[in-house]
Amino acid sequence: MGFLKGSLGIKRYFIENQDVFSKNRDTVVEKLLRYQFRSIESAAVEEAVGWVSPFRSYDPALKVEDTFLDSNLFLAMRIDKKTVSRLLLESKVHQFLDSGSSLTTGKQELKKLKEDIHQELLTKALPEPRIIEGVIDLPHSTLYLNTASHRSSGLFLSLFEKTFDILPVHIDPTAFAYLTLKEDSKLQALANAEESCFHDI
Amino acid sequence: MISDFVIPEFIFREFFLWLLVQSEMKAGSFELGGEYVSFRVEDQLKLEGEGDVRQTDLRKGVPSISQEARSSLRNGKLPTRMRVRLVTGGDEYIFVMDTKLMELRGVKMPVVPLSEAELKMEQRIFHLSQIYRMLELLFNQFASLRLDAEKWGAQVKEINQWLLEEPS
């Protein structure tokens, strides 16, 4: 389900320096376009990651009006992944060897043959696409990422960093406490607190 | 925003326990910044002991009032994940939160009856920030008790008393 509909799985990040977003909106979109999604259909590539329109996941032609929704910046990262089943690969390798078209005997030759067949099968495999959405609440310098997966959030942050030269800070439990309490003395006291005893009563 | 301190996870487990017990004792009603909110644990409660080896997963109904929950708590386990129903200002939110990452999962928010994406997004972000605002107010309330030895001592006594009671 997308950000605009259904239930969400949220990871929260703080953006310390968001100057880049307060400049010209076209500049932001230009930066996104530099890392727009490029299809890997018919290519011997296992995975591709890039920005697409949040409203049209097939469309890497991003527009300002799709990206800036009032005071929020709406981002969608598409991940396409292709896999070649091990069984299919083994079967194709054996088929090739049994056909007698090659006299492959050495380990290195066999490895090379496997790689070649793998590449060939990759070009024929259909990619499985996924969309990871993020929204930057600009007035609060907060990025909300709609994913429960650590790998997906890692890919999103890496693409975000390449695009904007900014790495958002994950609001983990300590950061949550910091944002809430806002005082180092309180944080330090909590960090040094001893565990309470609620059992063996 | 980089802090020199790391808050140990048990603080958040104690926070969850405090929320759980307070919500049971006060029928879910909390006063936060001058307004009353309803905070109830429903359908999902995970309790863990030391080393994360021993754990109890309670699902369906109101797990916090079950005999199993109290028994696990008395045996030293503390809540590490719970599904919450939060009602504030007439808006109802349901979500799962955990002590390890303080991330939210399965977040259900009021339906926004708007078709325009811009307004819809504005509302969704408002609702998300409301959830975090409430959690921050609750944590603030917990932290001021937790950092006052006398007040926290009284809370621990109250929690231990609740643990000894038979569920109604």
Image: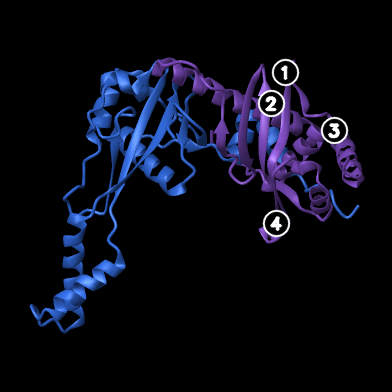
Q: Nearer the viewer, residue A89 or A52?
A: A89
**Earlier along the polypeptide chain: callout 1 or callout 4?**
1
Q: Label 4 is placed on what type of residue?
A: Gln
Residue with the mark numbered 4: B55
Q: Residues within 10 Å of mark 4 (few under 14, many from 20)?
A: some
Q: Is residue A46 left or right of residue B125?
A: left
Q: Label 2 is placed on what type of residue?
A: Leu
Q: Residue shown at 65%/33% (left/top)?
A: A184
Q: Which quarter of the image is occupied by the N terminus of chain A?
A: top left
Q: Residue shown at 91%/52% (left/top)?
A: A201
Spatial separation of the CA atoms under disc 3 and disc 4: 24 Å
- The image shows residue A70, relative to residue A31, as above or below, that is above
Q: Is residue B122 left or right of residue B145?
A: left
Respond whether the residues carrying marks 1 and 4 are from the same subunit: yes
Task: Please tell me the numbered disc located at residue B137.
Answer: 2
Report the mark closest to the observer, 4 or 2: 4
- The image shows residue A99, relative to residue B121, as above or below, that is below
Please, what secondary structure does the residue beneath circle 3 have? helix
Q: In the rendering, at what x and y percent does residue A45 appear? A: 22, 53
Tell me whether circle 3 and circle 4 mark residues in contact (CB < 8 Å).
no
Q: What chain letter is assigned to the residue under label 2?
A: B
Q: What chain letter is assigned to the residue under label 3?
A: B
Q: Nearer the viewer, residue B108 or B105?
A: B108
Residue with the mark numbered 3: B25
- The image shows residue A122, relative to residue B86, as above or below, that is below
Q: Quadrant of residue A189?
A: top right
Q: Which chain is purple?
A: B
Q: Quadrant of residue B23?
A: top right
Q: What chain letter is assigned to the residue under label 4?
A: B
Q: In the rendering, at what x and y percent does residue A108 appear? A: 19, 78
Report the mark closest to the observer, 1 or 3: 3
